[in-house]
Amino acid sequence: MAHKKGVGSTRNGRDSNPKYLGVKIYGGQAIEAGNIIVRQRGTQFHPGAGVGLGRDHTLFALVDGKVEFSTKGPKKRRTVSVVA
């Protein structure tokens, strides 16, 4: 005897892979040049002194030092910098 499967079960079963976004190194922590500070979609955090911006908006350290988060400018932009 033929049975119809529950309609939902054949239409489910899809999900995207996790992207592991977010802050990787927090304020006050030591960092080496080349290490990733923030993985993000768009510029939630903007690069400051000693920080580079990757093609996918990843922020990374250009120099060794300590990570510092701050808000700057009239738009209150969240900025990440690395101070020696």
Image (cartoon, rainbow, N blue to C red):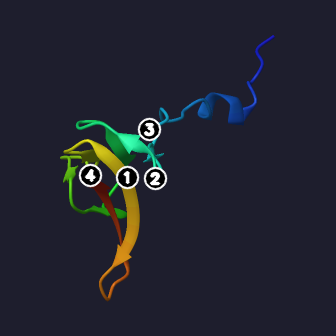
- Local packing at callout 1 (Cα closer than 10 Å; few below 14, some 14-19, many 20+) is many
Mark 2 sits on what residue? 28
Q: Which of marks 2 and 1 is nearer the N terminus?
A: 2
Q: How many labels does the image show?
A: 4
Q: What residue type is labelled 2?
A: Gly
Q: In which quarter of the image is residue 35?
A: top left
Q: Which of marks 2 and 3 is nearer the N terminus?
A: 3
The residue lying at 33 percent from left, 40 percent from top is: 36
Labelled pair 1, 4 in contact (Cβ < 8 Å) = no
Give the left or right position of residue 12, taking residue 50 as reference: right
Task: Choose mark 4 or mark 2, whichever is in front.
Answer: 2
Q: Between 80 and 65, which is closer to the camera in this rendering?
A: 65
Give the left or right position of residue 48, taking residue 11 as reference: left
Q: Earlier in the sequence, mark 4 or mark 3?
A: 3
Q: Distance between the residues labelled 4 and 2?
A: 22 Å
Q: Between 46 and 3, which is closer to the camera in this rendering?
A: 46
Instruction: Measuring from the top left, give residue 10's x and y in whole percent.
Output: 63, 28
Q: Distance between the residues labelled 4 and 3?
A: 13 Å
Q: Quadrant of residue 13?
A: top right
Q: In which quarter of the image is residue 12?
A: top right
Task: Choose mark 1 or mark 4, whichever is in front.
Answer: 1
The residue lying at 70 percent from left, 34 percent from top is: 7
Q: How far apart are marks 1 and 4 (CA)?
A: 17 Å
Question: Which of the numbered marks, if any, corresponds to residue 57?
Answer: 4
Q: Distance between the residues labelled 2 and 1?
A: 5 Å
Task: Choose mark 2 or mark 3, whichever is in front.
Answer: 2
